[in-house]
Structures are given as structure tokens and as C-alpha cells.
Amino acid sequence: MTARQLNRTAYLYPPAKSAPARQATPSVQGVTPCRTEPDLFFSDDDADIEAAKATCSGCPFSRGCLLDALEQEIEYGVWGGATAGERLAMLSGGTKRCVRCEKVQPLCCFHRSADCADGRAYRCKDCERSRDASRDSAARNARRRRQRAARKLATARKAVAA
């Protein structure tokens, strides 16, 4: 290989940079309650969730735990003292209260709407879906009533004609 070819190869394929050395973090295994009592941190019970948050508030690893959960977009459990909904709100930039179910949810749970002052719909996506489903069923029922009435009218006309 000529010197020119070597230079070109070095330019096109530079040597891989080594990753910066990470500081050694103390082992979490067996030290924190989240490792010894995982059921507490993945419970649906409000009392367990509050207990898990209280436990996280005194943990020296809670900040790193929360950052990891945000980075990996973990959807379940209490991580770093925040529930999945709270972490989603942190990532989406805010929260809003739904006027129908009255739940406070992250902005990403609301459709965009030019009609509202904040640019988001008044109802959350779940409430919109249930409203649309009820509208669809009401329209379907009205259509069936009209069809039934038309069949009765056709039957009555045939009876009169006969």
C-alpha cells in the first residue's frame, strides 16, 4: 500500500475512540430496599406507591435511578421517587386536567387542538375514544331503528296492496 492509500484509509476509517472511563459506582445489589422489596415498587396500591416514594426520598441512588428510568423510558413502577405518569409528565413538558374524567395527565395524553388556549384538547385521548365509541353506537342504533321502521312500512304496504 502506498503512503497516499494509507492516508486515505486512515481518513475514511479513523481508529475507534475509546469510551471515557466511567467512575465506579457502588454496588446497589442488596443495599437498597428496591432490591430487597421489589413488590413495593411495582404495586398498583396507592399506599404501596406512597411508601415506595418515601423510601426513594432517602436513597442515595434515587437521582441516578430516576435519570436512568427517564433515559430508558421505563413505563412501570416507581423509579427514583417518581411513578410512570410523573416520569411521562417530566418528559412531555407538563400536565393538564381532563374535564371529563378529571385526571391530571401529561400533555402527550391530549390531542392537539387549535380551539383551546393551550393548544391541547379539553378531554384526554381515553375520554375522546370512549366518547367516539358511544357516538358510533348511538349512530348504529339510530340506523337500525330507521331500517326496522322501513321494513315495517314495506310490510304494511305489501299487506295493503294484497
Image (tube, helix red, strand yellow):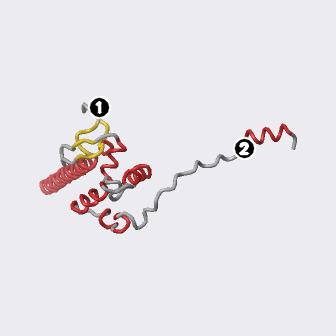
Q: How would you rate the neighbour count of disc 1 (Cα within 10 Å): few for under 14, some for 14-19, many for 20 or more?
A: few
Q: Position of residue 34 (x, y in %)?
A: 35, 63
Q: Nearer the viewer, mark 2 or mark 1?
A: 2
Q: Quadrant of residue 33?
A: bottom left
Dot 2, how many residues are within 10 Å of its Cα: few (below 14), some (14-19), or many (20+)? few
Q: Quadrant of the N terminus?
A: top right
For the point 30% across and 49% down, the residue is 86
Q: Nearer the viewer, residue 156 or 19?
A: 19
Q: Between 106 and 56, which is closer to the camera in this rendering?
A: 56
Snapshot quadrant of residue 38? bottom left
- Which residue position is annotated with label 1? 114
Helix, strand, or loop for circle 1? loop
Name the residue carrying label 2: 13
Q: Is residue 93 left or right of residue 133?
A: right
Q: In this rendering, does residue 162 appear at all? A: no
Whole-percent x, y for residue 81 in the image: 31, 54
Q: Where's residue 88, x and y in %? A: 34, 48
Q: Amino acid at mark 1?
A: Ala
Residue 54 appears in view: yes
